[in-house]
Amino acid sequence: MEKKSSTKISYVIPCYRSEKTLEAVVEEIRDTMTSLHEYAYEIILVNDCSPDDTFAVIRRLCAADKNIIGLDHAKNFGQHAALMAGFHFASGDIIVCLDDDGQTPADEVDRLLAKIEEGYDVVYASYENKKHSAFRNIGSSVNKKMTEMMLGKPKELYLSSYFAAKRFVIDEMMKYQNAYPYVIGLVLRTTRNICNVNVNHRARMEGTSGYSFRKLTALWVNGFTSFSVLPLRTASYGGVFVAILGFLYAVYTVIAKIMDPNRIIGWSSIIAILLILGGFILLVLGMVGEYIGRIYISLNNSPQYVIRTVLNYEANEKI
């Protein structure tokens, strides 16, 4: 990909509880872009119905800089929905996604862009020393295993919230119109021409991660139910395995009774088996119900996001 002065970078930043950090992140992007003369840029800030004054900060930033587009969600739809909303307003040739808390170093974006220029479709930042909490690191490890098993992610590929992607990748991702978007799954089903580049990882400027255990669990469920039927296949294999065990136990019980007519079949073991089978059946039914529920919600055209307010978009359409 040959560098041209008309090449434009769109920074898409989901914002939640970042009233104290967002201005510093935007300022760092501005300072960085002053040394990258071959690129034009814009910044899309997506307020995911943050309970603090994050949107007031976004409004102030937009008033001072017409290169910044501000979006305000009508309710909290989650980080991945916020990214999808930002993609629909991004006009750049390369889209860069990063966090609003200052942990992802905007001043090292040139490393990601260099790999894009080499010919990669998507470039993810990787970190030698992560500054996340222990809980968040555990969640990342679980998510890594889930994407490998369910989505076929290469083991050597590290996925993070800081990445750059070519325009055609984002255009393909935006074709996904259903509720519960999962950006990682959309990237992996679009291209495998992906690489990593090492960058520094910082401690949070303020506050703690917005990902609670409930939100992380919902993210994992969303990932494997939106882009994989492997859980259903695994349940089917598990059902066959349990059925075989049940058959073998029944054969054992008959043979034992023939060999010893006075043998008393234990009711406790039967109850235990019934509880195991009942629990397994309910687990499978719950899994099937999760898929059916998502189909139902998609058929009802449940939105990925709802935008209450858009700032500066008309001005950027002219760029």
Image: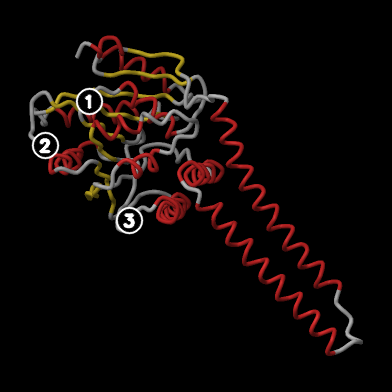
Q: CA distance from mark 3 to mark 2?
A: 25 Å
Q: How is the image coloured?
A: secondary structure
Vertical comparison of 107 with 5: above or below: below
- Of callouts 2 and 1, which one flags the residue occurring earlier in the amino acid sequence? 2
The residue wearing badge 3 is 154
Q: Which mark is residue 92?
A: 1
Taking 2 as reference, is 154 left or right? right
Name the kind of residue labelled 2 in the image.
Met
Q: Residue at x 27, y 45 (%)?
A: 124
Image quarter where the N terminus lies is top left
Q: Residue at x 39, y 19 (%)?
A: 71
Which residue is nearer to you in this view: 110 or 246?
Answer: 246
Q: Secondary structure at mark 3?
A: loop
- For residue 218, what is the image quadrant? top right
Q: Residue at x 27, y 46 (%)?
A: 125
Query: Residue 251 location in percent, x, y?
Result: 75, 78
Which residue is nearer to you in this view: 111 or 157?
Answer: 157
Query: Residue 108 location in percent, x, y?
Result: 20, 40
The residue wearing badge 2 is 1
Taking 226 as reference, is 313 left or right? left
Q: Secondary structure at mark 1?
A: loop
Q: Secondary structure at mark 2?
A: loop
Vertical comparison of 158 with 10: above or below: below
Name the kind of residue labelled 1 in the image.
Gly
Tell me if label 3 and label 2 are in contact, CB under 8 Å.
Answer: no
